[in-house]
Image (cartoon, rainbow, N blue to C red):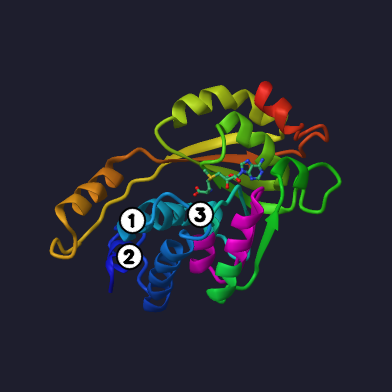
Amino acid sequence: MNKVSKILSSVKEMPVSEEARLERFEWLAGHIAEENKKVNITSITDEVGIATKHFADSLSLLRLEEVARENIRLADIGCGGGFPGLPIKMMRDDIDVTMLDSTEKKIKYVESTARLLGLEKINCIAGRAEEVGAVDTPLRESFDIVTSRAVARLSVLSEICLPFVKVGGYFIAMKAASADEELEEAKNGFSKLGGRLMRCVDVPFTFEGLDADTFSDEELSRLEEFSSAKRVLIVVKKVKPTPEQYPRAWARIIKKPL
Ligand code: SAM
């Protein structure tokens, strides 16, 4: 077991325990570090950083009952190098995942990585969310879960994500320290887009039984820092269809968020 497996298998709240899956995460961590020399995928390239900030953080979505449902269709908007969608797909053979990003080289990387991992039921699309999810397009209102991490402030993100959610499904934004402030700014916009705020879920991380010999003091203090950082999943239910004028053009969304 390398550091990646040790970290993922020690997350008390939801450990990864199957050996075959841990091996795939180990492989992916090495692959990210290698590929990052050619394509700028992420600024985090060491095992501890990848295992916590990319893998464990992405997998926290699986703790929610909305995501635990079987055979759902999930979209990751602005997936970049594949987070959170790729780790989620690596844990869940049943679900159908769509990865969307406006940067073509990132999507090409995600697509080839998914192929190398042997993942099925994963669809990679290069495009802008506000165009791909516009009215009368095939992916509009077609997902049970739409999620996104580190793409835009919540008031902007809801306009590009909620149109993709089918009525009865959920938009789940992954947010950190600024969650309360962003929620305050964004909450009036949810109803305009057909959404209703359901709950905000704090995401604790406790690492249990990590052997201190494997990790340097510096790595242990980074693990500690990761555990104590604030992380929130903001769950918005789609209660009625999004009016056809949304999403607006990007410049307009940014200039005047709902
Ligand atoms: N979600 C990944 C993560 O957490 O590691 C990547 C985050 S990265 C900071 C933001 C990504 O959002 C970039 O890859 C960018 O190309 C993408 N993005 C920004 N605006 C977008 C839009 N309107 N439609 C699709 N992708 C967008």
Query: Mark 3 packing: few (<14 Cα in 10 Å), some, or many (20+)?
Result: some
| Quadrant housing residue 134 | top right
Residue at 73%, 40% in the rendered image: 130
Quick check: 79 left or right of 33? Answer: right
Q: Could you say where residue 228 lies in the image, as x and y percent from the top left?
A: 27, 41
The local secondary structure at tag 3 comes to loop
Quarter of the image with the C terminus in it: top right
Residue at 77%, 39% in the rendered image: 241
Disc sitting over residue 88 in the figure: none
Is any part of residue 258 visible from this angle?
no
Viewer-side residue, 26 vs 235: 26
Tell me, yes or no, whether the highlighted magenta stretch contains residue 96. Answer: yes
Residue, far front: 38
Is any part of residue 15 visible from this angle?
yes
| Residue that label 3 marks | 41
Write down which quadrant ligand 1 falls in. top right
Q: Indicate the amino acid at tag 1.
A: Glu
| Residue that label 1 marks | 13
| Of callouts 1 and 2, the N-terminal one | 2
The local secondary structure at tag 2 comes to helix
| Of callouts 3 and 2, the N-terminal one | 2
| Residue that label 2 marks | 4
Quick check: 87 left or right of 248? Answer: left
Residue at 62%, 31% in the rendered image: 156
Q: Which callout, 1 or 2, points to the residue nearer the camera?
A: 2
Q: Give the residues in magenta.
A: 86-111
